[in-house]
Image (cartoon, helix red, strand yellow):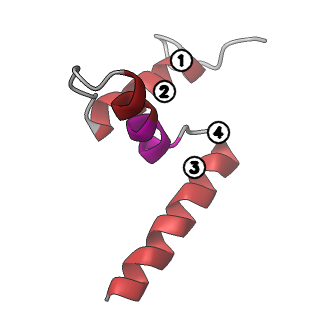
Amino acid sequence: MKKFREIYKKLERFFHLLVGIPSYDKYLEYHYKYHPNCQPKTRREFFLEAQEKRYGNDGSKKCC
């Protein structure tokens, strides 16, 4: 079961990078290093913010 979880985590990171979703694990590493006294965003909050940055308020993709 441990091996399966490791494979799943690697695949999840790969697909997130493939579609342009930032890594929550990388965010946590950065957050704990540079903002140790603040509470980090939850995984849900992090991904909602990433979607907002990418697609905007109305759900349509922003122009470059």
Q: Judge by depth and name the residue closer to the eye, 62 or 35.
A: 35
The CA distance from mark 4 to mark 1 is: 11 Å
Rendered-image quadrant of the C terminus: top right
Q: State the CA–CA distance, disc 1 to disc 3.
A: 15 Å
Q: Closer to the N terminus: mark 4 or mark 2?
A: 4
- Image-quadrant location for residue 34: top left
Please give the residue where the numbered disc 1 appears in the rendered image: 53
User: What's drawn in magenta, residue-wise?
Assistant: 23-29
Which residue: 48% across, 12% down? 58
- Main SS of the magenta segment? helix
Residue found farthest to the right: 64
Which amino acid type is marked by label 1?
Answer: Lys
- Amino acid identity at mark 4: Gly
Where residue 33 appears, x then y in whole percent? 40, 31
Circle 4 — which element? loop
Residue sitting nearer the eye, 44 or 9: 9
**Label pair 4/2, CB-CB below 8 angstroms:** no
Q: Is residue 6 magenta?
A: no
- Badge 2 density bin: few <14, some 14–19, many ≥20, Cα 10 Å: some
Which residue is identified by label 3? 16
Residue type (three-letter) at the residue carrying disc 2: Ala
Q: CA distance from mark 2 to mark 1?
A: 5 Å
Judging by the rendered image, the residue that carries numbered circle 2 is 50
Q: Which residue is mark 4?
A: 20
Q: Helix, strand or loop at disc 3?
A: helix
